[in-house]
Image (cartoon, rainbow, N blue to C red):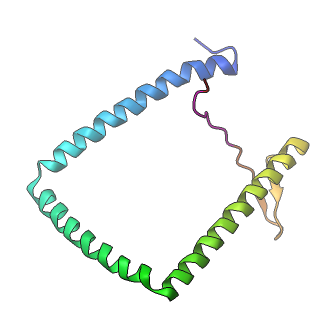
């Protein structure tokens, strides 16, 4: 049966997506069970746990170092700036698409770039 409207397609796909996610969850549980029954895997898990503890101790020492703190703060600032710039660019690209209906744009270096439009469903509202 072919869907007549996008809304019908959405309503048809949502249960299929939920079923697929449930199958993925079940398969992941099966994989986890299989790994936990493997002796070599268990041994490596213990070694990883021990090394993770040592890494956590080393990280604590680094976090106490002022030079490390400054570099880390600089990184956080730059990440925030980059995220803000990406959001601004996204807004302008969407405006460009709404005005022109074109899915390509020429960038500042003269290269033609494809616009990737995306939409997601949010959480249900009350």
| Residue at position x 12%, y 62% in the image | 43
| Residue at position x 70%, y 48% in the image | 116
Magenta stretch encompasses residue 123? yes
Instruction: Quadrant for residue 32, please give it.
Output: top left
Direction bottom: furthest residue? 67
Q: Picture coordinates of residue 25 (x, y %)?
A: 34, 36
Q: Picture coordinates of residue 108 (x, y %)?
A: 83, 68
> Looking at the figure, which quarter contains the C terminus?
top right
Of residues 69 and 48, the one nearer the viewer is 69
Q: Picture coordinates of residue 85 (x, y %)?
A: 74, 63
| Residue at position x 30%, y 41% in the image | 28
Judge whether 82 appears above or below 94 on screen: below
Q: Is residue 55 left or right of residue 99?
A: left
Secondary structure, magenta segment, majority class: loop
Direction top: furthest residue? 1
Q: Which residues are magenta?
A: 118-124
| Residue at position x 82%, y 55% in the image | 105
Instruction: Quadrant for residue 3, please give it.
Output: top right
Judge whether 30 appears above or below 9 on screen: below
Q: Is residue 98 left or right of residue 121?
A: right
Instruction: Quadrant for residue 63, please give it.
Output: bottom left
Judge whether 78 appears above or below 18 on screen: below
Direction right: furthest residue? 99
> Looking at the figure, which quarter contains the N terminus?
top right
Judge whether 6 appears above or below 111 on screen: above
Q: Is residue 34 left or right of residue 86?
A: left
Of residues 110 and 8, the one nearer the viewer is 8
Please count the marks in the image. Answer: 0
Magenta stretch encompasses residue 27? no
């Amino acid at each position: 049966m072919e869907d007549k409207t996008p809304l019908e397609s959405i309503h048809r796909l949502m249960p299929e997506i939920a079923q697929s996610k449930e199958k993925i969850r079940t398969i992941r549980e099966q994989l986890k069970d299989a790994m936990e029954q493997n002796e070599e895997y268990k041994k490596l898990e213990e070694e990883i746990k021990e090394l993770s503890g040592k890494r956590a101790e080393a990280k604590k020492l680094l976090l106490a170092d002022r030079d490390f703190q400054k570099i880390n703060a600089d990184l956080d600032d730059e990440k925030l700036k980059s995220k803000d710039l990406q959001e601004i660019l996204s807004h302008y690209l969407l405006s460009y698409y709404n005005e022109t209906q074109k899915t390509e744009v020429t960038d500042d270096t003269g290269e033609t770039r494809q616009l990737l439009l995306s939409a997601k469903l949010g959480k249900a509202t009350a």
